[in-house]
Each structure stands twice: as structure tokens, then as C-alpha cells.
Image: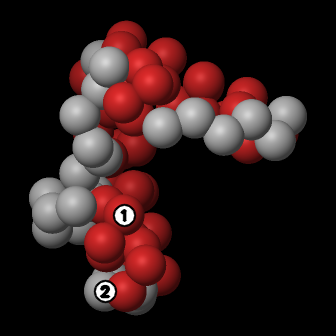
Amino acid sequence: GSVTCWILMLSRYAMRNCIKFLAPDLALPPRACLVCGGDAKACARSRRHGLPEVQQVVETIVKESASQTA
């Protein structure tokens, strides 16, 4: 929804401007992995999911979001 969009925009701004913030700074729960729903930080650090798998999940999310707004 709009909250997800806002968080993605904020994350993109922070990355471009070298600003680091943590979920607790924004009173948000830890991020969930897009692939398995587990702790995103743990999945990223261990590289639990391959890039093609992550890309496919992201593509599905984008397609579903686009179909809901169309």
C-alpha cells in the first residue's frame, strides 16, 4: 500500500544520500525476507536465496501491485 511505497522511497533517498537508519529508528519491526518471510537481515547476510529467486519474487510483487492500481 501507500506505506510500503513511502518506505521504499525513503530507503532509496537514504541510500542515495548515504544516510543509514534502522527500522527501530522509525518504530518499525525488523524487515521480513521477501522470499521466505524470515529475518531479512539474516537471509541477506547468509545469502540464503540466490539473486534469480529474489528477482522473481520482486517481479511478482511489482506485477501484482501494477494490476491492483490499473
Depth order, front residue of 7/30: 30
Q: Secondary structure at mark 1?
A: helix
**Residue at image coords 48%, 38%:** 22
**Helix, strand or loop for disc 2:** loop
Colour scheme of the picture? secondary structure
Where is mark 1, residue-wise? 41
Q: Position of residue 65 (x, y in %)?
A: 33, 32
Badge 2: residue crowd in 10 Å (few <14, some 14–19, many ≥20)? few
State the image coordinates of residue 9 (x, y, percent, origin top left): 60, 25
Quickly name the residue at label 2: 48
Identify the amino acid type marked 2: Arg
The numbered mark, 2 or 1, whose residue comes first in the sequence reads 1
Residue most extreme to the top: 2
Residue 66 visible, this angle = no
Residue situated in front as seen by the camera: 24 or 10: 24
In the picture, measured across the screen, residue 31 lies left or right of residue 50, that is left
Q: Please state, as top left, top right, bottom left or bottom right, where the C terminus lies in the image.
A: top left
Which image quarter is the N terminus in? top left
Residue drawn 40% across the image and 43% down it: 62
| Residue 24 picture location, percent across and down | 36, 30
How far apart are the alpha carbons under marks 2 and 1? 10 Å
Residue at the far left in the pictured view: 37
Q: Amino acid at mark 1?
A: Lys
Q: Residue at horizontal 23%, vertical 34%? A: 29
Other residues around mark 1 within 10 Å, as few (<14) / some (14–19) / many (≥20): few
> Does residue 36 sit above or below 2 in this rendering?
below
- Is 16 or 41 nearer to us in this picture? 41
In percent of the image, x 57 and y 35: which residue is there?
21
Position of residue 28 measured from the top left corner of the image (x, y, whole percent): 30, 26
Quarter of the view holding residue 38: bottom left
**Image depth: mark 2 or mark 1 in front:** 1
